[in-house]
Image: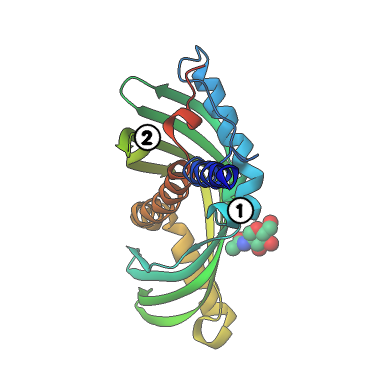
Amino acid sequence: MRNMKYLTIFLLVTSAVAVIAKDLPEFLHVCKRNDPNINECIKASVEHLRPYLVKGVPEYQIPSIEPLLLRELVAAEGGGLKLSAKDVNAYGASDFSVTKMNADMGTFTYLLDVFLPHLSIDGQYEIDGKVLLLPITGSGRLTGNFTDCLGAVKFTAETETMNGVEYFRVREFNLKITVGKGVLRLDNLFGGDKVIGDVVNNAINNNFDAFIKELMPIVERALGTAFRDIGQNIVNQFTYDQLFPLD
Ligand SMILES: *[C@@H]1O[C@H](CO)[C@@H](O)[C@H](O)[C@H]1NC(C)=O
């Protein structure tokens, strides 16, 4: 009887511990806090995550980023045309490579550069404006390809103690993207009229830089929020000691 009581207490205590500190999953490649090569280590951790970002890990609330859905409406103007897009799926975001990592564990400031060789998008557009004095309004399918994109991420973090346990929290997350080359295509302009369709598509691609300049801040916010949420979700499930062990 007495032994039963101890056993019950023992089981309660061990199961409580198991709930608080999840075991480290396979997708998490942790770095020692004082690793002299912490930049290389974090870079490897981010790269190690890639296949898990492709498939997603539902048990840890990691969604698949292939494709990455940008639901929010984005709009841009250039060459007399106003273009807006929504429900855009982006493909290729998981194909990144981390080209630079600069981690400061003292101030919890992290700078990383990522290279995206190829991103393609597929979504819905609406267009309104004039090309060669011809009024253009329409909507349909939008596709596009972007090559040699550079992303610069800066995030800061802090630790927060809850019930005596220290956690690592992402505080600010900022993403800037530079697009190398890109091409957009709007299908079904004027019920699929090829001549006018080509004229409008050329007008857009000739003004590509102007469109991209306006679209990018919104795309950056959408992608930045997606990546911050994924990162936050992952780190929140482990303690600071688990993520960055002392030794
Ligand atoms: C994007 O690239 C794919 C594959 O190379 C190609 O099939 C597609 O036509 C391209 N789309 C545009 C809008 O150029």
Please indicate whether residue 202 sits to the left or right of residue 222 in the image.
right
> Residue at 46% of width from left, 20% of height from top?
33
Q: Secondary structure at mark 2?
A: strand
Amino acid type indicated by mark 2: Val
- In what element is the residue under mark 1? loop
Residue lying at the far bottom of the rendered structure? 191
Let me know if residue 188 appears in the view.
yes
Q: Depth-wise, is mark 1 or mark 2 nearer the camera?
A: 2
* Above or below, comparing residue 63 to residue 4 in the picture: below
Q: Position of residue 10 (x, y in %)?
A: 54, 41
**Residue on which the image places disc 1:** 57
Q: Residue visible at 38% across and 21% down?
A: 104
Front residue of 187 and 4: 4
Does residue 64 show up?
no
Is the residue 85 above or below the residue 136 in the image?
above
Task: Give the x, y percent position of residue 113.
Answer: 47, 32
Under mark 1, the amino acid is Val
Indicate yes or no: mark 1 CB to ligand 1 under 8 Å: no
Ligand 1 positioned in quadrant: bottom right
Number of residue marks: 2
- Residue shown at the point (65%, 54%) measured from the top left: 55
- Residue 134 location, quadrant: bottom left
- Residue 165's tag is 2
| Quadrant in the rendering for residue 172 | top left
Query: As rendered, which of 34 and 180 lies closer to the eye?
Result: 34
- The x and y percentages for residue 126 are 41, 77
Display coloring: rainbow
The mark nearer the N terminus, 1 or 2, is 1
Residue 83 as seen in the image, left or right of residue 123: left
